Image (cartoon, grey):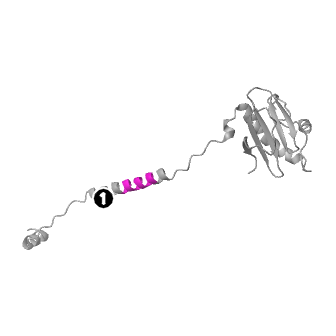
Amino acid sequence: MASFKTSALEEDGTVEVVRPDNGRIESYWLIGSIVIILSIASYVLQNNQAPSLAPQKHLELDVEGKAVLTALRNAADEIMFLSDDGSLPAVSELIEQELPPFADSNGTFAAYSWNLHDSVCYFGRSSKEGSREFVLKIHNDHSEIYWRQTAVNTPNCDQLTNWETASTHD
């Protein structure tokens, strides 16, 4: 005896073809979705880059210049502490306090001589050929450090426009 379904289809004359579910169409949709997502992500990453920044000037200093810059940054806080009355301490007082780079205990800053100019800033010049000059300018709440290649004139603490700078306040 034939099954009921076969005889019912034969009598109606309709044949229905059922394709096997092999997942081929779903695979195309998945691949298409991944391509769209990757395209959008690559477009966003390509167009959402931060602008390139110029390198910081203090990174161009040689080892000796970086050592002096670091010592001046550290000394700036101590000098602000020592100058509670508003006047900056003399270089001789900083040497007595053994404050680098004014006092040189290990020979790192031996080539530098320091002066207090106009009771506003400290000026350091090295006796070595090709070394940089440094200026430490102290304000009430922050300090600024300037440097340049050695020049013949003594700096004016108010006109440091052609000098490189590193501000020590945040």
- The image quarter containing residue 65 is top right
Query: Can you see residue 71?
Result: no
| Image quadrant containing the N terminus | bottom left
Secondary element under disc 1, as helix, strand or loop, is helix
Q: Residue at 81% across / 43% down in the picture?
A: 157
Query: What is the crowding at mark 1: few (fewer than 14 residues within 10 Å), some, or many (at least 20)?
Result: few
Q: Where's residue 97, x and y in %?
A: 90, 38
Which sits in the foreground, 156 or 102? 156
Q: Which residue is mark 1?
A: 26
Q: Is residue 152 above or below residue 53?
A: above
Which sits in the foreground, 155 or 62? 155
Q: Is residue 38 above or below residue 71?
A: below
Q: Report the amino acid beneath label 1.
A: Glu
Which sits in the foreground, 93 or 119? 119
Q: Where's residue 82, x and y in %?
A: 89, 46
Q: Where's residue 79, x and y in %?
A: 86, 44
Instruction: Indicate whether residue 131 is drawn in magenta.
Output: no
Query: Can you see residue 113?
Result: yes
Q: Residue at 69% across / 35% down in the picture?
A: 61
